[in-house]
Amino acid sequence: MKLVLLSDVHGTTKRPIARTDEDYSATFLHKFRQVLKIAKDANAPILIAGDFGDQAREWEYLNLMVALLRHRNVDIATVFGQHDIYQRNRKSINVVSTLLNMGYVSLLHERPLLLGGMYSNSASVRVYGASWGEQVPVVEENGKEMYNILVIHDRITEKPENFPHVPCTPALEFLKNHPDYDVILCGDIHKYFYLRAGEGGAYERSIINTGPLMRNTAEANMFNHQPIVALLDTVTNKIHTIPLDVRPAEQVLTREHLDRDKEITQMLTEFTESMQQVDSATIDIHVALSEYMKTVKNLNREVVKIVERLLNGLRATDS
Ligand SMILES: [Mn+2]
């Protein structure tokens, strides 16, 4: 059987600050419809590795998804990414939990999803899932000979690195540590990789991250990212990637807000530095305030006395 593999989706109807699209919902729909079509044409369910939505509770996005999925016969199974969970509480209602309750998507977890009856040639395919923060499921003792797939949302990177400031597991190490899985689909780290163990000889096992469907930020790696889905054939044990029809990054991503942030930081730094260089004699707020009070007509003498007492107190703490 065939399965469509997709890492983070990060769907939203709200145009991210890094995007220039006039109608971001339309951009998202154009992309997600391609994914659905690929799945339909291949008679394949779609596996998603979490961060289905960019925000846990964006009801406009939920509405869009319901409208998109209600007439389509495509099976979608997912895990929860941290973006899907509202305030770190798995029990609070969110977009994904609502789609689960409505039956438009299924949740992958420690007990495998058996794709047996639904697809041809698939009696032996089992899909396990680990949402954000969950342990990697142990493959059932009587299921080791099956074609086992793990979908996980966790910090797994192509090479050893700390992101963001937390150690990540290198993908090949993760693959070696979980030998009962034939294919591992990861989400969380927004970077494509596809690595294999046992190439050319021993039985091949793979670990893949397709990268995010939506390029929502203007980091350098997003400018180089080609949104794709992967199509896994469990019979041949091969994965091939399918690039999606998207506009070039230069046309839809902007660094303007990052440049503006940089400019503001620069201005603040300059201001702080200039203040540090100011001679205290040239700016004396106490003198300035006393002089100012003299110019105010009908100022209550009591007020003047209070302010002067305060200023004298401040002078005392200054010295
Ligand atoms: Mn993500």
Image (cartoon, grey):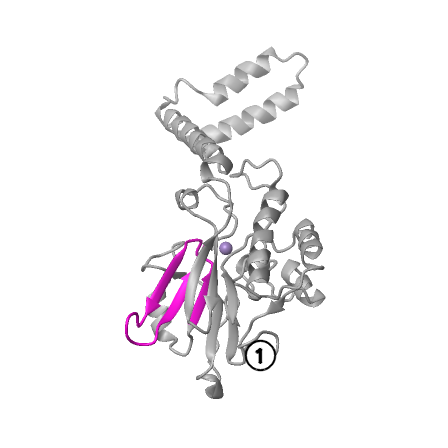
User: Residue reaching furthest bottom?
Assistant: 142
Residue 229 locus on image (x, y percent): 49, 57
- Near mark 1 (Cα within 10 A), the count class, few <14, some 14-19 or many ≥20, is some
Q: Label 1, secondary structure: give it.
A: loop
Q: Is residue 41 above or below residue 144?
A: above
Residue 185 locus on image (x, y percent): 46, 65
Q: List the residue tagged with mark 1.
A: 116
Question: Is the residue indicated by label 1 positioned so its CB lies within 8 Å of ligand 1?
Answer: no
On the question of residue 95 being in view, the answer is yes
Q: Is residue 284 above or below residue 251?
A: above
- Residue pictured at 32% horizontal, 70% vertical: 197
Q: Is residue 197 above or below residue 157?
A: below
Q: 132 or 261, which is in the foreground? A: 132
Could you say which quadrant of the image residue 224 lies in? top left
On the question of residue 170 being in view, the answer is no
Residue 298 locus on image (x, y percent): 68, 13
- Residue pictured at 65% horizontal, 54% vertical: 57
Range of magenta residues: 183-211
User: Residue reaching furthest left?
Assistant: 201
Residue 62 locus on image (x, y percent): 68, 54
Question: Residue 283 magenta-drawn?
Answer: no
Q: Quadrant of the C terminus?
A: top left
- Residue pictured at 63% horizontal, 13% vertical: 296
Amino acid carrying label 1: it is: Gly
- Residue pictured at 51% horizontal, 52% vertical: 213
How many numbered badges does the structure rendering display? 1
Q: 39 or 93, which is in the foreground? A: 39
